[in-house]
Image (cartoon, rainbow, N blue to C red):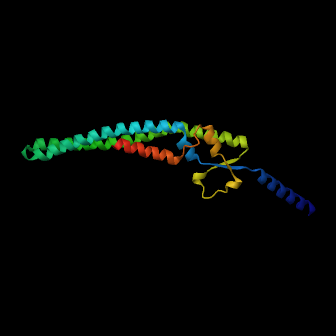
């Protein structure tokens, strides 16, 4: 009986000691990725590709609208064969517009993924290295937690920001404000 008690006490002490040494950390991964200098250049490339696609789309819609207006104006004077031909042409233009929309959505998704993959990887590597340096066994993303007791967890975000060359004064809010200002400038 004493032996069982000693074994149980040893297991309990070992569990308490192991728990006391377990280190947890947290990081705002979304903040890191969005504020990295590389993310700025990726956004510029995405916006340029999006603008180019939007110009192409607009010209396709303008072509359709022009031919549609012409069809409405002149259809009464056309023979049935000409009217059918023009209707088919309008249908083909509509199909091209729809195919372009689908293709450009896929292309933009692929471009975003290819531009952002190395950015995510770099941020993950920095967080992983910081965690290893500090002897952390788990790092949680604050964006996916309902609650975190910051007193019992190491915040790796400030050190990761430094390692990723993110200026101290750069915030999500300042980036969003700059993007809104740029969008308003383009709209004018």
Furthest residue to the right? Answer: 2
Q: Position of residue 165 (x, y in %)?
A: 59, 37
Furthest residue to the bottom? Answer: 1
Q: Position of residue 72 (x, y in %)?
A: 14, 47
| Residue sitting at x 16%, y 42% | 86
**Image quarter of the N terminus:** bottom right
Regarding residue 114, the answer to whether it shows in the image is no
**Front in this rendered view, residue 83 or 18:** 18
Q: Position of residue 121 (x, y in %)?
A: 58, 38
Furthest residue to the front? Answer: 169
Q: Position of residue 46 (x, y in %)?
A: 43, 38
Say left or right for 62 vs 117: left
| Residue sitting at x 59%, y 42% | 168
| Residue sitting at x 44%, y 37% | 44
**Image quarter of the C terminus:** top left
Say left or right for 21 vs 186: right
**Front in this rendered view, residue 123 or 109:** 123
| Residue sitting at x 91%, y 59% | 3
**Front in this rendered view, residue 33 or 65:** 33
Vertical comparison of 169 with 142: above or below: above
Quadrant location of residue 182? Answer: top left
Q: How many marks?
A: 0
Vertical comparison of 17 with 107: above or below: below
**Front in this rendered view, residue 144 or 102:** 144
Regarding residue 35, the answer to whether it shows in the image is yes
Quadrant location of residue 162? Answer: top right
């Amino acid at each position: 009986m004493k032996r069982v008690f000693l074994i149980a006490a040893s297991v309990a002490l070992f569990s308490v000691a192991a728990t006391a040494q377990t280190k947890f950390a947290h990081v705002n991964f979304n903040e890191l990725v969005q504020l990295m200098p590389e993310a700025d250049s990726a956004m510029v490339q995405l916006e340029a590709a999006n603008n180019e696609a939007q110009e192409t789309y607009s010209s396709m819609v303008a072509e359709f609208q022009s031919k549609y207006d012409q069809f409405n104006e002149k259809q009464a004077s056309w023979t049935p064969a000409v009217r059918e031909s023009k209707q088919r042409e309008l249908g083909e233009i509509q199909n091209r517009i729809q195919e372009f929309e689908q293709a450009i959505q896929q292309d933009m998704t692929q471009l975003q993924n290819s531009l952002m993959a190395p950015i995510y990887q770099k941020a993950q590597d920095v967080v992983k290295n910081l965690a290893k340096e500090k002897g952390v066994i788990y790092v949680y993303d604050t964006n996916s937690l309902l609650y975190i007791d910051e007193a019992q967890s190491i915040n790796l975000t400030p050190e990761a920001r430094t390692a990723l060359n993110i200026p101290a004064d750069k915030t999500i809010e300042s980036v969003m404000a700059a993007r809104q200002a740029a969008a308003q400038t383009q709209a004018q």
